[in-house]
Image (spheres, rainbow, N blue to C red):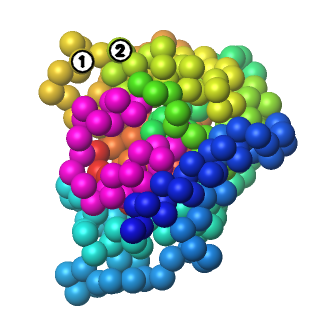
Amino acid sequence: MMKTLVAFLLVASIIAATSHGADEEPYQIFPLRLKPGSGSEGATVQGITCASWRLAVEAHNIIEWKTVPAECENYVGNYMLGQHYRDDSKAVNREAYFYVRSLALPKDGRNIWIFDIDETTLSNLPYYAQNGFGVEPYNSTKFNAWVEKGEALALPETQKLYNKLINLGIKIVFLTGRLTTQTEVTASNLKKVGYHTWHKLILKNTTEYSGSTAVAYKSAERKKLVKSGYRIVGNTGDQWSDILGSYTGRRTFKLPDPLYYIS
């Protein structure tokens, strides 16, 4: 029943989004709603509420988890499609902007800000709404088929930060775990939803990074940037693996994501 309702809301919202004016945040996710409010705590899992489970996940106290507890599907769905998620995203991106405004950066063209893509700049909620909001085990075939559609939506609070950074003269680097075979569709998707320019778009080369964790891969790519003379002013991601490791940048910012865990 919930998946049917979500599917209806997703279709209705996407249709509405494509008809909006430029100042009305087209291709955004947050007009979607399951019901008013940000979702109740709902069921319990292993003796705690789903809200407490999510907090432990975001604080990196629960790690290496494979799926969202089945009892928490409705809770996570309501959180991700509700105002609470947008407010949390806004808080993170606002602090990032306050931080960067406080810096006296050299105007030498070497300042960069690293953004992850999935659940950081682009949202895959239409996919996860049809696949249990993280309750179902990750299926690479299904997810990659979704990526190839190029229909991921923009995360508006991140996009606001992106625009402000560009106005401040900071260059944008997208560093994602998506594969190099998905470069064209990823670039097209980014531009489609309003990320029109960037300095570098780095995707994972499976030959070079076969068997590597996300932490190892992203650390290595950040090292290349630093050794090339770039200054990583900030680094934003939804996974801890986006902001852990080496060469993480002057400051890191973690966006909420209770849908999946990448080590």
Q: Badge 2: few (under 14), some or many (20 or more) residues near its Cα, within 10 Å?
A: few
Image quadrant containing the N terminus: bottom left
Task: Give above or below for 185 relative to 86.
Answer: above
Q: Residue furthest left?
A: 211
Prevalent SS, magenta region: helix
Q: Which residues are magenta?
A: 122-147
Q: Is residue 126 visible?
A: yes
Mark 1 sits on what residue? Answer: 206
Amino acid type at image mark 2: Thr
Q: Residue 181 at what x, y percent from top left?
A: 35, 14
Task: Give above or below for 39 relative to 215.
Answer: below
Front residue (pair 35, 159): 35
Q: Badge 1: few (under 14), some or many (20 or more) residues near its Cα, within 10 Å?
A: some
Amino acid type at image mark 1: Thr
Q: Do the residues bearing badges 1 and 2 touch, measured as CB atoms within 8 Å? A: no
- Relative placement, left or right, of 137 versus 11 is left
Q: Secondary structure at mark 2?
A: helix
- Residue displayed at 30% across by 16% down: 205
Numbered disc total? 2
Q: Residue 150 at what x, y percent from top left?
A: 50, 28
Q: Residue 228 at what x, y percent from top left?
A: 48, 12
- Residue displayed at 55% across by 52% down: 10
Mark 2 sits on what residue? Answer: 181
